[in-house]
Image: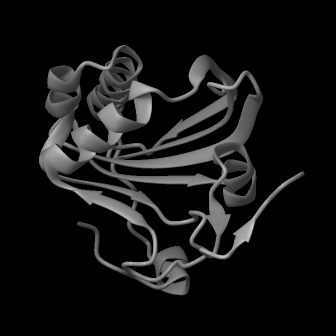
Amino acid sequence: MTKAISLGALLKANDDPADSAAGRRAAKDAILRFFKAVATRDAAALAQSITEDAVYEIPFSESGSTEAGGFRRYVGTTEVVEFWMETTANGPKNLGAEDVELSITGDGSQVFIEQRGNMVLTDGRPYRNKYVFRFSIRDGRISHVREYFNPVVAAYAFKRKIANTFLIETL
């Protein structure tokens, strides 16, 4: 877990960031293992790609709440793996990511991915949303993920209510 620090203090600090080519390679490999396991629905490989105390959060969900307990959050290997197995069981067909931008911190402890998802829903409608992922890497495995996307587009696609009240009928 990282220590909270103000943006001003962070920018004023004179500490040079750590740099590790091996750390960056390990981070990239961890992300590749994770996405491959999700794509192939390999629960065992997915469990191996994350730490036992892994956290997967979706803070900008359809609930409209960014407060703890107000959005989807999965803690531990079992919950994270179950989330992905349920999500991919009868979910949309993934046609691959587009416009992918990958950033890895110098020491490999954080990975950021921005991409556009390109999927086909089970009813044949296209689903294209913009995603930003923030991965924390520890000992070559993923320890924390924050997945951000446009919740209005997702609510429309999956027929979920916004703020548990409004159903989006058209975009």
Q: Classify 31 as above or below 54.
A: above
Q: Residue at x 53, y 80 (%)?
A: 7
Q: Position of residue 8 (x, y in %)?
A: 55, 85
Q: Residue at x 41, y 19 (%)?
A: 39
- The picture quadrant where one finds residue 101 is top right
Q: Position of residue 84 (x, y in %)?
A: 34, 36
- Is residue 171 toward the left or the right of residue 80 in the image? right
Q: Classify 139 as above or below 18.
A: above
Residue 30 visible (yes or no):
yes
Q: Position of residue 114 (x, y in %)?
A: 63, 40
- The picture quadrant where one finds residue 138 is top left
Q: Residue at x 35, y 42 (%)?
A: 19
- The picture quadrant where one finds residue 26 is top left
User: How is this picture coloured?
Assistant: one colour
- Is residue 151 toward the left or the right of residue 135 in the image? right
In the image shown, does 7 or 75 lie closer to the viewer? 75
In the image shown, does 109 or 119 lie closer to the viewer? 119
- Is residue 99 toward the left or the right of residue 171 in the image? left
Question: Among all residues in the image, which is located at the extreme right?
Answer: 171
In the image shown, does 152 or 168 lie closer to the viewer? 168
- The quadrant in which the N terminus is found is bottom left
Q: Position of residue 147 (x, y in %)?
A: 50, 51
- Is residue 111 toward the left or the right of residue 165 in the image? left
Q: Classify 159 as above or below 13.
A: above
Question: Among all residues in the image, which is located at the extreme left?
Answer: 52
Q: Residue at x 73, y 71 (%)?
A: 166
